[in-house]
Image (cartoon, rainbow, N blue to C red):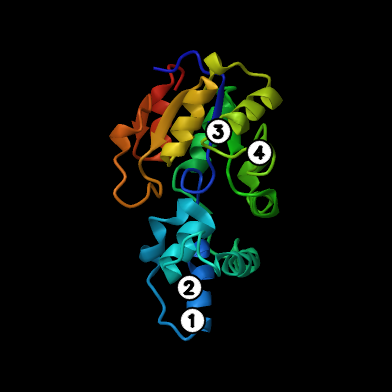
Amino acid sequence: MFGHIRCVLFDLDGTLIDSAADLGLAADEMRVARGLPSLPIEAYRAHAGAGARGMLGTAFGVTPEHAEFGALKEEFFDRYEQRMTRLTRPFEGVDQLLLTLTRQRIAWGVVTNKSRRFTVPLTATMSLFSAAGTIVCGDTTPHIKPHPAPVQEAMRQMNVSPAHCVYVGDDERDMQAGRAAGVATVAARYGYLGAGADVSRWLADAIIDSPIQLLNLFDTA
């Protein structure tokens, strides 16, 4: 299906790594500190892709428009920074996927909305990211996904054209960013998705249910 692809770009959280437990527990610690009962991790998982907004919305029912959201967000960031590597792991099959891409001489990189403050130290703890051609963070460019700028910046750094690139992610904004950048898109249905998400409506070029299934889309796999 993608025999022309020379580069694969991935979203991070919910696509390459499962960080829901550390994100959720950072917010849950805030609940407990305020005398509220703990919530199960599964309550947070579906919203993990939305970062602080999703975690604080689950924990406290607040939105970014709430007067206390700014202060809560900063506390969440501090708590998450202290624990972000405790339970976070690559999804099953990711190591094999990335190793196979490298062996097939298909370059790969990361495009995430996660800020450099968290992305750099987190990926530094996982050896698989040493082979990444680039890691574009949420503050690398003036825009975040669904704007195409981060995907375009990754392609610029990796010296690849849109016609030879595919972007894989678990959120509709990943598909929107990829399409706007002119690359093929693959929806990772095993990711966080969000409550009530209908992946079939994301207009992705392909959908996968596990990381390793991506290899089935390449003629060289």
Closer-to-camera residue (83/105): 83
Residue at (51%, 83%) from the top-left corner? 34
3D distance between C-alphas at marks 1 and 3: 36 Å
Residue at (57%, 26%) from the top-left corner? 103
Above or below for 182 versus 136: above
Q: Nearer the viewer, mark 4 or mark 3?
A: 3
Q: Secondary structure at mark 1?
A: helix
3D distance between C-alphas at marks 2 and 1: 6 Å
Residue type highlighted by circle 3: His
Q: Nearer the viewer, mark 2 or mark 4?
A: 2
Above or below for 25 versus 195: below
Closer-to-camera residue (126/79): 79
Instruction: For the N terminus, give its image quadrant.
Output: top left
Q: Nearer the viewer, mark 2 or mark 3?
A: 3
Tag count: 4
Q: Name the N-terminal-most of marks 2 and 4.
A: 2
The disc label shown at residue 32, or none: 1
Picture quadrant where residue 156 is located: top right
3D distance between C-alphas at marks 2 and 4: 29 Å
Q: Which residue is mark 3?
A: 147
Q: Which residue is mark 2?
A: 28
- Residue 206 location, x and y as percent? 36, 27
Q: Secondary structure at mark 3?
A: loop
Residue at (44%, 47%) from the top-left corner? 92
Q: Name the N-terminal-most of marks 2 and 3.
A: 2
Residue type highlighted by circle 2: Asp
Q: Which residue is mark 4?
A: 135
Q: Are marks 2 and 1 in contact (CB under 8 Å)?
A: yes
